Image: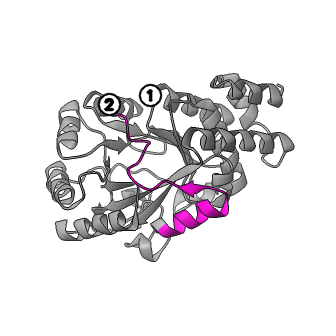
Amino acid sequence: MNVHDLIGKSGKGIPLSRPELIGLLSLAPDSPETYAVMAEANRVSKELTGNKAEVHAQLALNLAPCPADCRFCSFARVNGVFREETRITPEQATAYAKQFEKDGANAVYVMTTARYPFGLFLEISREIRRNLKPETVLIANVGDQSLSNARKIKDAGYTGVYHALRLREGVDSGLSPQKRKESILNFQEAGLLVGTCVEPIGPEHTNEELADLILFTASINPAYSGAARRIPIPGTEISGRGAVTELRMAQIVAVTRLGMPRTVLGNCTHEPCTLGGIAGANLYWAEAGANPRDVREKTEEGRGETVQSCRTIFSECGWDVWRGRSRYFANPI
């Protein structure tokens, strides 16, 4: 495998194949070849966006011991981090969303655990939508849904959703990989744009697994793809597996960018970091309320970033930040 030949292929706008992706993922993270791949991913991301990154912001309507039992999540019932459910009020949710809008987030996400009452989600969503500017992009981050429910999400004022087929879905989670895929199709059929990610990456995941998930995310023509490492939740079984370094994460972010068609403008990573931005990430998140990577009930008092801190991180690695509606969710299906 000649890395410079693959970079030349990328320069022609041709996504990389499975063997090529595996080859790039197999390089040492600190090798000159990997740095060349990062540079190419950075070039592509900046070319597609005019060097304008985006900062999206997410609020959580609840936290709960969730029976979906995604072992990498602080909400998982099996992890025992949160033993009782707490929910924020419609007024609190609206206040969070309006603050994110005021701060200049390019899109506002509303997240729930997998078993949050769907009718209540719609009720609060409609209240949030009524209180935001018409041009503010609203994105849902909820559990698997039927086509009927997906249409209701669209009718409640959402432009898109975040939904991912996670690594080792059905093994490290209690959710069905097939249901995850079906939900993505239902969201798209309902006219919602889907953002996704290769996540949550740990040291145990093979290059073959990563390449297969990169190709899956490319196949759905998402609003954005990208890659995110697993943040260990202290005291949980899965935390014993450790975490990949930011450098390894940056390598995977870069390879993911080269695996996407050029119709996909966004390339995310989480949590925000300069190495990710250098490697072609052009989407970070600010967060408020509950956070599946945090043990604090209010992540703004813990791991969560603000819109401004995300902008600062982008600035540190040479990015400007887009002001206005998200361009990643600009084109209706």
Mark pair 2, 1: CA separation: 9 Å
x and y, in percent, of residue 174 in the image: 39, 43
Which quadrant, please, contains the C terminus? top left
Which quadrant, please, contains the N terminus? top right
* Residue for point 67% across, 59% down: 317
Q: Which residue lies furthest to the bottom in this view?
A: 301
Left or right: where 259 falls relative to 332: right
Mark 2, secondary structure of its residue: helix
Residue 117 in view (yes/no): yes
Residue flagged by tag 1: what amino acid is it? Ile
Q: Residue 322 lies in magenta, yes or no?
A: yes
Residue 220's tag is 1
x and y, in percent, of residue 206 in the image: 66, 37
Q: Residue 223 lies in magenta, yes or no?
A: no
Mark 1, secondary structure of its residue: loop
Task: Give residue 25's quadrant in the image.
Answer: top right
Left or right: where 202 falls relative to 111: right
In the rendered view, tell whether residue 129 sits above or below residue 25. below
Task: Give residue 299's quadrant in the image.
Answer: bottom left
Q: Are marks 2 and 1 in contact (CB under 8 Å)?
A: yes
Between residues 203 and 193, which one lies in front from this camera angle? 193
Q: What residue sits right under mark 2 in the picture?
A: 188
In the rendered view, tell whether residue 117 sits above or below residue 81. above
Residue flagged by tag 2: what amino acid is it? Gln
Rate crowding at label 1 as few (under 14), some (14 to 19) or many (20 or more) other CA atoms within 10 Å.
some
Q: What stretch is highlighted in magenta?
A: 308-333
